[in-house]
Amino acid sequence: MENAMKKPPYQYDEPIWKIWKHKRYIVAILSFIGFMNIYALRTNLSIAIVDMTSVKNTVLPNGTIISEKEFNWDSTIQGYVLSSFFYGYILTQFLGGWLATKCGGARLFGFGIAATSIFTLISPLIAKTNVYLFIVFRILEGAFEGVTYPSTQELWSHWAPPAEKSRLVSFAGSGAYFGAVVAMPVCSLLATNLNWEAIFYVFGTLGLVWYLVWAIVVRDTPTKDSNISEKELTFITESIKLVKSDVNVKIPWVKILTSKCFLATTICMSCETWGFYTMLTFLPQVMKSLLGFDLNEAGFLSAVPYLLTSLSMQLSGYLSDFILAKGYMNTTNVRKLFVILGFICQGSFILIAGYWVTPVGIPLCLIVGVGLGGTAVGAVMINFLDIAPKFASVMFGIANTVGTVPGIVSPIITGYIVTDSTNIMQWRIVFYIASGLYFFGVMVSFFFMSGVKQPWAEGDENTANGDKKI
């Protein structure tokens, strides 16, 4: 029978306000900002494309007013442009998980964001050149960003003590949603007061600045960090109780791919990402075209759900660690609790939004529904570290490869369904699909998710000089 989390034998009692003595918290804060950059770089086009394809009036010297679009892309082309990022993103998930075990999670995380930032800076020039070339560049951006998420699983397998795992991983990952919160209104302001090109220049530059700080401060493991205190180093390494050797353990591919709990978490991730990417990509259009908000209002309202997502993700991480430390529930039930809570909230409120079509109804439903979904996101992200911490980056890479399919398919399908962005009947179909997948995820998580470390989690026992328990 699964036991609740045991009290760790090693304690680290430095006051929390002495942040410079908590290197793992510094890693978490910089990871949070890194994830902010990831989603700002990913979502900026969702706002920019509204301005890029809007009808604008140009006054000629003779006083004639010409109404035209800078980019005359129909809804189908826009769907391909918006989804193209994920064509590259899906290709490097598995590669990112594998590379992280070879070259280090911190190094790969930073490289992925830096490369994506460079491509973002070049994007305006490419978009003006040719739409198909722009799609190719978005694919390349996605490919470089694809290695980032799996690499953090490898990073936290070295940096997160079990008693703090939920809160550290949830806090760092919640930066992605906070990035959406910042990006949407800032992108709207930049597009309104400057132009859509400024969106790419500003966020591309911020990504490179972050990379410089990350490269200087963060190392792949605590043992490679010359600035960590001996006391904290002992606390982390003895809590995790893993010693890395020079020879890697053999990855049990067949056992991973046939594991019911791994497949369940992968399915839950896919259910979550379908609804998330649908809302992330099309929420500004819903606010602007269906409800009549201007671009600034649409940007701000579209950002609010992700602020709540970030907060609910952090809160669920702290609550998870608290419940486990007190022994109120075991790890399996804690993960199931927060996944089911998040999925029910999202599925229910998105469904209601299709019928409460008012300037108050839709924003309120999406704010509450999408916002509380952060509890599910955090539980899913942590679960790979529960069932097999050594292979968490590889498993996450596989799962996120599958979970990225909605990022490709959802915008395209939505583009075909919603031919008139002012037609609520068409948007309802989009909401039905997302809601149905959330409730399917509830069933899968209830019956098949697990928080128990699996028998194959140590790899091939016959591998010489493999990872050994202390």
Image (cartoon, grey):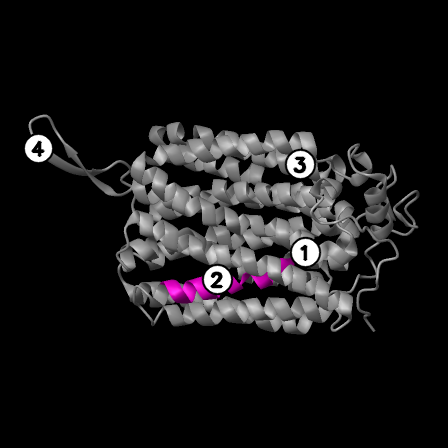
Residue 90 visible in this rendered orientation of the protein = yes
> Which is closer to the viewer, label 2 or label 3?
2
Kindly identify the amino acid type of the residue bearing the numbered disc 4. Thr
Residue farthest top in this picture? 61
The residue shown at (54%, 44%) is 36
- Ranked by sequence position, the earlier of labels 2 and 1 is 1
Compute the Cα span from label 4 to label 2: 46 Å
Crowd class of label 2 (few under 14; some 14 to 19; many from 20; radius 10 Å): many
- Ranked by sequence position, the earlier of labels 4 and 2 is 4
Crowd class of label 1 (few under 14; some 14 to 19; many from 20; radius 10 Å): many
Kindly identify the amino acid type of the residue bearing the numbered disc 3. Leu
Q: Which residue is mark 2?
A: 370
- Ranked by sequence position, the earlier of labels 3 and 4 is 4
The residue shown at (55%, 43%) is 89
- Residue 311 shown in magenta: no
The residue shown at (63%, 49%) is 172
Label drawn at residue 108: 3
143, above or below 355, in the image:
above
Q: Looking at this view, is 48 or 31 the one in front?
A: 31
> Which is closer to the viewer, label 4 or label 2?
2
